[in-house]
Amino acid sequence: MSYLFEFNWLAVITATVAGFLLGGLWFSPLMFADRWIAAIGKTPEEMGSPMRSMVLSFITTFVMSMALALIIGRLPDMTALGGLRFGVVLGVGVNLMGMISDAAFTKSSRELLWIQGSYHVVMVTVMSVVHAAWR
């Protein structure tokens, strides 16, 4: 059980910050904010203050980073390129497929699925590269 707490904490924090900042950019007016809010079916005013959601997002990104550190730390040595491959496979094969299944039941728009799904694939990939490169 002790292996559950054996992390490269600098890599965990770096990957967390990278994933969180990517989300800030992804859902900003520079990228997909307007299309994302429209796809949700809300106005910016209805969205309210994002502070509580941002705190929760940082916490969930931190937990994801620890999980990736745990998984990647148990795999054979891998390079940053291996981390890229691993991240894409995990992002598409687990995250995106789960989101597609959810979207089939919730009838959410393809645009919303694309915006959120592609973010999660890229985020998991970036975080996997950080963890693989830092081993």
Image (cartoon, grey):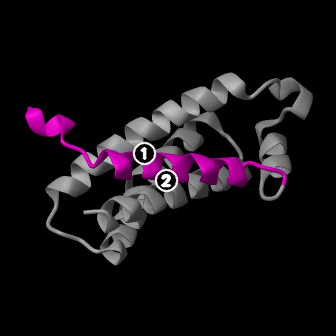
Callout 2 secondary element: helix
Quadrant in the rendering for residue 104: top right
Label 1, residues with CA under 10 Å away: few <14, some 14-19, many ≥20: some
Residue on which disc 2 sits: 96
* Magenta stretch prevailing secondary structure: helix
Indicate the position of residue 4 as horizontal and vertical percent values.
Answer: 17, 36
Q: Which residues are magenta?
A: 1-29
The numbered dot on residue 13 is 1
Distance from the alpha carbon under mark 1 to that under mark 2: 24 Å
- Total numbered circles: 2
The residue at the point 78 percent across, 58 percent down is 31
The residue at the point 66 percent across, 22 percent down is 52
The answer to whether residue 10 of the structure is visible from this angle is yes
Indicate the position of residue 13 as horizontal and vertical percent values.
Answer: 42, 45
Give the amino acid type for the residue marked by disc 1 in the picture: Ile
Q: Quadrant of the N terminus?
A: top left
In this view, the residue in front, 80 or 37, is 80
Quadrant in the rendering for residue 81: bottom left
Label 2, residues with CA under 10 Å away: few <14, some 14-19, many ≥20: many
